[in-house]
Amino acid sequence: MAKPNQTTKTYSIFGAGAAGLYTAWRLLNGEVKNSKDKSKKLAKGDTLELYDWGRYDFSKAHPGTRAAGARICTWHYKNDKTQAYLELGGMRYSDWDMNAKDANNGTAPGHRVVTTVIKQLGLDKYSVPFNESTNPLYYLRSKNFFLNQITSQIPAPYHVDHYGAAGTPDNGFSILEKLSVTKNMTRRQWDTFYRDGEIKVNTGDGSVYQKGDKLKDIGYWNLMYDQLGSEGFNYAADGNGYSSNVINWNSAYAFQANNEFTPGNQYKTINIGYSGMFNALFEQIVKLAKAQGVIFNYQPNTRLQSIIAKGKTIHYSYATRENPWKKADTKTTDAAWLAMPRHAIEQVAQGSRFDLEAGVTDVLNHRKVQLYLEAAIMQPSYKVGMFFSTPWWTANAENPPTYIPQLTGYEVTQRAVVQLKALGLSKATLKALSSLVGTPYASSTDLISAVEAITEERLSLKHENALLEVTFNSTIGPSVTDTPIRQVVYFGNNATDPKAKPVYGLLASYDDEIYTTFWKELELEPNQEQHIPNNENVQTLIGPKKVPDRMVKMLRKQLAEIHFGPNSDYTMVPAPVEAAYMDWSLPPFNAGYHAWSSHFNIGDVQQKIRKPSQLMEKTDVDIFIVGEAYSNDQAWVEGAYCTAESVLNDFFGVEPIIDNCEYPFICSAK
């Protein structure tokens, strides 16, 4: 058994996704002001270990099998980073305007930690709008229509009570919110709502749920069905595009989460691919460790098998990818971070049960820890990406669709301002454009009018054309359907190399929950049998897998129906030049994202599960759990960063990365 030098510290992080990388970065760059906490800061001669079951492609010195980011996975055409890309995992963040005069107040929107990380890593120059259509295309119950076509005379094809089908699918969420929610609640107010929120209106004798009922103890599916009826529920479930939004999760939290698309949110991504943020984090970790004399040990293809404590010392065993169920070695550490989702933690807990002996503390298998682990619902997700030689879904296609997604928009970015400066636009115009960065415009006329209203001068035809060219967007969508592909997201040609032969990316299926099994069954041909046990199928760690021919044909059939109408022949959609999928229901994640279960105090779980020994009497073990699963921002990188930040602030004395007075990283217990 290896034993660390008694005069130095060893910190061990298990998981090299968002939470693990963020923890390593902040352990190295975080400031500690309290003298009693300075001994906890990594110093010269200390060791920082980063273990991961996968092998991410971090750099030339640390190559891997797939893009960095765990459940973020940028996939480039032919795996060439100069070519067009698709996101087969998480793909965006909510931008926070940190320069606004009200940036730190309680109602300022945005993912504040992710935005800050992107800024500090120098990636903000790559930040671009994640352009969503203001008039999305729907294909529901074999009817093709656009959002602006839904009226009382031509409702959506659902028999919703009180003319509900004459409104948008999201209106069902708003109806439920009116049972309790006050508009424009702050992050801290939502914190209280998760614990104390209740139905505040009289729902009538016909309702199952009544005034005064605690929302945290009500399943959201149950509540939706009760309030909207069968057809109202089906319209909201089908039309919002995410089955995960309407499952039986914690209603109090669902109210906030389904408020995602409220005005004021500006979604962005980085145009080198979202995985680029994690490459940059890893690069900084390596540089900081070297500069500070900290020994950085990155160990890929390594699975944490068990973890227990003997006194203050943590003992862990690990296995290799080649023999994932056989113990390779046992080591000790001073502090351990499980930067893992629920399923992976539960596997470690199972392995830890076999290490019990006198004087051993088995934190993960304590009864209350096991209970709190169950507070996160695992939500399977499946994404299929396809590249085409032409943008067949556009009006300029050789055989344009009957139903063309309305993706056109205009938005000024910092990159666009730089490009226009080189063309000699006036200082007044450039200043005006800088003030409009991040504001979307539905038409070219609206954008030009906004610029000219500030400058009070006309743009020349040359500069007008240049402005429209560099601000034009023809992505992202999505189009929404109740067929198994669920959502279609149009990435187009986003290659960084302007001279590269163009290819056009399409996220042909973005689905979750029950729809994932539809595609899973198509992974094997009719004459093939299963040969790999599911618990050994770590395709998510290896990388995107080629789509079999029959799955391609099924995708083309459904894409044809969305864009050309019911029963359209699959050949209306051309064959892709490349296609790949990621099945996030596979280990070690077993979920694309997580949701809070009902009948739990979310704040108490967030506070206690991050250092699970808090749930045990007279026990203090430096084993921590970080990640989006038990966060205040489930399904987002923000959640992973915030849980990691809260651990470092509260247990290691690291000063908060931002002003968190009005932006608590996690919920309070009371």
Image: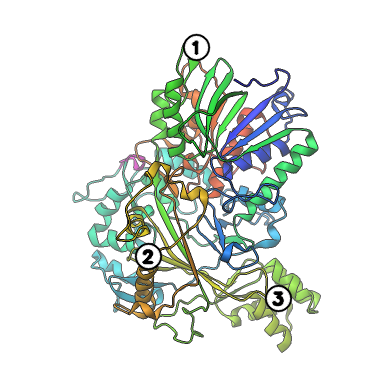
Q: Is mark 1 in CB contact (under 8 Å) with mark 3? A: no
Q: Secondary structure at mark 2?
A: helix
Residue 213 falls within the magenta-colored stretch: yes
To which residue does mark 3 refer? 454
Q: Earlier in the sequence, mark 3 or mark 2?
A: 3
Q: CA distance from mark 1 to mark 3?
A: 72 Å
Who is closer to the viewer here, 559 or 458? Answer: 559
Q: Residue furthest left?
A: 206
- Which residue appears farthest toward the top when viewing the image? 358
Q: Work out how far the residue at label 1 is from the one at label 2, CA to CA, in angstroms.
A: 54 Å
- The residue drawn where x is 57% and y is 66% is 77
Query: Label 1 is placed on what type of residue?
Result: Gly
Counting other residues with Cα less than 10 Å from the Cα at mark 2, is it few (<14), some (14-19), or many (20 or more)? many
Using the numbered discs, state the Cα–Cα distance from disc 3 to disc 2 in whole angstroms.
52 Å
Decide if residue 569 is in sight here: yes
Question: Does the CB distance between marks 1 and 2 fall below 8 Å?
Answer: no
Q: Which residues are magenta?
A: 212-217
State whether residue 664 appears in this view.
no
Residue furthest toward the bottom?
A: 461
Dot placed on the residue nearer the N-terminal end, 1 or 2: 1
What's the residue type where badge 3 is placed?
Ile
Residue annotated with mark 1:
359
The coloring applied to the image is rainbow
| Image spot of residue 68 (x, y percent) | 59, 51
**Is residue 616 part of the magenta span, yes or no?**
no
In the image, is residue 43 above or below residue 232?
Answer: above
Can you identify the residue that label 2 sits on?
A: 551
Of circles 1 and 2, which is in front? 2
